[in-house]
Image (spheres, grey):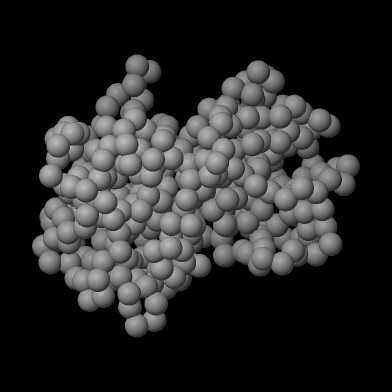
């Protein structure tokens, strides 16, 4: 999660309730392509110590003033539209204001609320002591922009290309949280503001996630908030009878997890582990809810650049997933690897020969 100041609410059951927050991916043109600003949290911080994050923080009460000067040029209605109408207009505007304010307070860099591009939403998994419901934004700044006023919450700032940052995370040079890793993955193919707006544009389907009926040990999940983008959909699966394997959790907001939990409980079953078909955000963005929030094991297949801030067991072709009551083995996708899916890590074959993902069937949303 993006760095935020300490402070959190408490839900009725005693667990931490998520605090509204905003983070900003600052983007500038560099010699080898665009660069993003990553800032490192000091080792003395109570939250995310030593982690590289995007500037950001909690939404303060003062950010919610309707006439806030940092909202200049942006109406509450337009702010809500940019967030896919997933927040009430005053709250949507307050998130934009917080993004501008936190960026200036932490880095001395001034961005305009009206120029922000909404990217994604991330919610810290339940069970952790500090939880945040954070909206991620992008802001393009002029070439040569530098940090001019470092706050005590930062002990290092670095402009770096997304690909280089991911390589540094894989090698251990940079410590990143999952939201930062996924955001960098999502930024790899973009080249300008138009690309960013297209890549993160809210999808048309704002309906609630759903779990289909179990047929021979398999139920399909229609996931909302795929990769944290409002209205985007992705397909996942529950495999098994009582001890279930969840394949490809894509929603990092927890909204799909709530629906899945209800369906699993109604069946008298439990989720015992996670299997990923690949490292791309539409397969893995929601895995932290289960891996960090619930401590469930995660497996993935060889062939993908699988690195994450949680343990992942890598399986080879023919290996069986080591949990669940339905045999699930790693297999090549039907007909070979489809074009455009070069990062595919694995496909999984059920005992009756069905393969997930089913590339021969309908395309994934």
* Farthest-out residue, bottom: 31
The mark total stands at: 0
Say above or below: 163 vs 95.
below
Judge whether residue 27 can be spotted in this image.
yes
Q: Is residue 157 above or below residue 231?
A: below
Percent position of residue 210, x then y: 63, 30
> Viewer-proximal residue, 323 or 101?
101
Question: Residue at point 49% right, 57% down?
Answer: 199
> Is 31 above or below relative to 183?
below
Q: At 72% across and 60% down in the image, what residue appears?
A: 316
| Residue 203 appears left or right of 2 | right
Q: Position of residue 194 (x, y in %)?
A: 43, 63
Would you identify the image quadrant in which residue 172 lies? Answer: bottom left
Q: Indicate left or right for 62 with 250 as reference.
A: left
Task: Give the residue drawn at x 46%, y 38%.
Answer: 253
x and y percent of residue 301 in the render?
67, 58
Between 50 and 40, the residue placed more toward the observer is 40
Residue in the image at 25% along x and 71% along y: 142
User: Which one is in front, 295 or 239?
Assistant: 239
- Where residue 36 appears, as percent x and y from the top left, is 33, 66
Q: Is residue 314 left or right of residue 308?
A: right
């Amino acid at each position: 999660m993006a760095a935020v100041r300490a402070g959190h609410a408490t839900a009725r059951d005693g667990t931490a309730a998520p605090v509204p927050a905003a983070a900003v991916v600052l983007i500038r043109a560099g010699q080898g392509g665009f660069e993003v600003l990553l800032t490192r949290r000091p080792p003395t911080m109570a939250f995310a110590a030593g982690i590289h994050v995007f500037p950001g923080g909690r939404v303060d009460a003062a950010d919610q003033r309707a006439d806030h000067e940092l909202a200049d040029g942006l109406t509450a209605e337009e702010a809500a539209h940019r967030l896919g109408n997933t927040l009430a207009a005053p709250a949507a505007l307050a998130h934009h204001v917080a993004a501008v304010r936190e960026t200036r307070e932490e880095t001395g860099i001034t961005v305009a609320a009206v120029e922000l591009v909404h990217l994604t939403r991330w919610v810290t998994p339940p069970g952790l002591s500090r939880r945040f419901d954070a909206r991620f934004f992008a802001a393009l700044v002029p070439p040569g922009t530098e940090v001019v006023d470092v706050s005590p919450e930062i002990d290092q700032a670095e402009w770096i290309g997304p690909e280089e940052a991911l390589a540094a995370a894989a090698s251990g040079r940079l410590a990143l949280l999952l939201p930062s890793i996924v955001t960098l993955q999502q930024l790899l193919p973009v080249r300008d503001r138009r690309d960013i707006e297209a890549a993160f544009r809210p999808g048309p389907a704002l309906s609630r996630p759903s779990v289909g009926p179990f047929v021979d040990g398999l139920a399909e999940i229609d996931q909302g908030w795929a990769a944290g983008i409002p209205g985007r959909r992705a397909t996942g699966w529950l495999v098994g009878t009582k001890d279930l394997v969840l394949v490809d959790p894509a929603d990092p907001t927890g909204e799909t997890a709530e629906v899945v939990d209800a369906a699993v409980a109604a069946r008298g079953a439990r989720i015992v582990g996670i299997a990923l078909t690949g490292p791309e955000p539409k397969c893995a963005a929601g895995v932290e809810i289960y891996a960090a929030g619930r401590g469930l094991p995660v497996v993935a297949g060889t062939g993908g650049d699988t690195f994450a801030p949680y343990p992942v067991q890598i399986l080879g072709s023919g290996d069986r997933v080591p949990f669940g009551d339905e045999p699930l083995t790693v297999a090549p996708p039907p007909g070979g690897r489809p074009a455009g899916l070069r990062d595919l890590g694995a496909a999984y074959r059920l005992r009756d020969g069905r393969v997930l993902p089913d590339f021969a069937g309908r395309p994934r949303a």
